[in-house]
Image: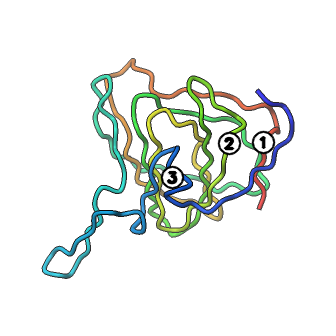
């Protein structure tokens, strides 16, 4: 792994820029929209590809509570879930950061990117996408999470430590 210092540029989160890593979950990304409930609601369908069926997996709904991080922040690890997607939908009206990397069995550290999710934008990591754990910014934030549940003993989280203080995020 690389050992030189690299400060990541924070990019806006858009469906096009995030496509190699999964889906952006927001109204702007919806291709399937229609009115329901006698005109009192709008439905935006198929916002993310929930993929959790490998190895007898099933969809699991959880809430994650993330403590805020202060910038500048040194990245310490990346993780991936090879058997299923993992969707994060913010329940708090706060921006947060999304750090992702391409790669197969190990992350491609030259491809690490950092996105700023606006309030109301969620993400769905495709199976096997390397990502940093949640990065709330200004205050504690809750996220509804849809990911893979499954039989005990089947590992679905790989972690890789990053070189100490090699990758930074700054405002």
Question: Could you tell me which residue is drawn at 13 percent across and 80 percent down?
Answer: 38
* Residue 100 quadrant: top right
Q: Position of residue 82 (x, y in %)?
A: 46, 28
Mark 2–mark 1 CB contact (< 8 Å): yes
Q: Which mark is residue 112?
A: 2
**Mark before the other along the chain sequence, 3 or 1:** 3
Point out the residue furthest to the left here.
38
Residue 49 located left or right of residue 132 = left
**Mark before the other along the chain sequence, 2 or 1:** 2
Q: Position of residue 56 (x, y in %)?
A: 27, 25
Residue at which label 1 appears: 167
Q: Position of residue 131 (x, y in %)?
A: 58, 40
User: In the displayed structure, would residue 48 be above or below residue 40?
Assistant: above
Q: Nearer the viewer, residue 142 or 58?
A: 58
Q: Nearer the viewer, mark 3 or mark 1?
A: 1
Q: CA distance from mark 2 to mark 1?
A: 9 Å
Secondary structure beneath disc 3? strand
Q: Which mark is residue 83?
A: none
Question: Could you tell me which residue is drawn at 69 percent across and 54 percent down?
Answer: 69
Q: Nearer the viewer, residue 122 or 30?
A: 30
Quadrant in which the N terminus is drawn: top right
Q: CA distance from mark 3 to mark 2?
A: 24 Å
Question: Could you tell me which residue is drawn at 57 percent across and 36 percent down?
Answer: 130
Q: Position of residue 133 (x, y in %)?
A: 58, 43
Mark 2 crowdedness (10 Å alpha carbons): few <14, some 14-19, many ≥20 = many
User: In the displayed structure, would residue 32 be above or below residue 2?
Assistant: below
Secondary structure beneath disc 2? loop
Question: Could you tell me which residue is drawn at 57 percent across and 60 percent down?
Answer: 13
Q: Nearer the viewer, residue 46 or 148?
A: 46
Residue at which label 3 appears: 65
User: In the displayed structure, would residue 167 be above or below residue 11?
Assistant: above
């Amino acid at each position: 792994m690389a050992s030189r210092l690299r400060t990541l540029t924070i990019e806006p989160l858009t469906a096009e820029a995030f496509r190699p890593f999964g889906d952006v979950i927001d109204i702007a990304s919806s291709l399937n929209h229609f009115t329901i409930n006698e005109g009192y609601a709008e439905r935006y369908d198929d916002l993310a590809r929930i993929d959790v069926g490998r190895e007898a997996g099933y969809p699991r709904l959880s809430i994650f509570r993330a403590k805020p991080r202060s910038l500048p922040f040194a990245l310490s690890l990346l993780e991936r879930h090879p058997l299923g997607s993992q969707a994060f939908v913010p329940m708090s009206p706060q921006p947060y950061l999304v750090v992702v990397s391409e790669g197969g069995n190990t992350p491609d550290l030259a491809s690490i990117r950092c996105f700023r999710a606006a309030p109301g934008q969620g993400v769905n990591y495709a199976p096997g996408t390397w990502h940093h754990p949640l990065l709330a910014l200004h205050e504690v934030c809750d996220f509804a999470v849809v990911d893979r549940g499954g039989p005990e003993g089947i590992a679905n989280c790989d972690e890789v430590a990053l070189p100490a203080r090699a990758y930074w995020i700054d405002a």
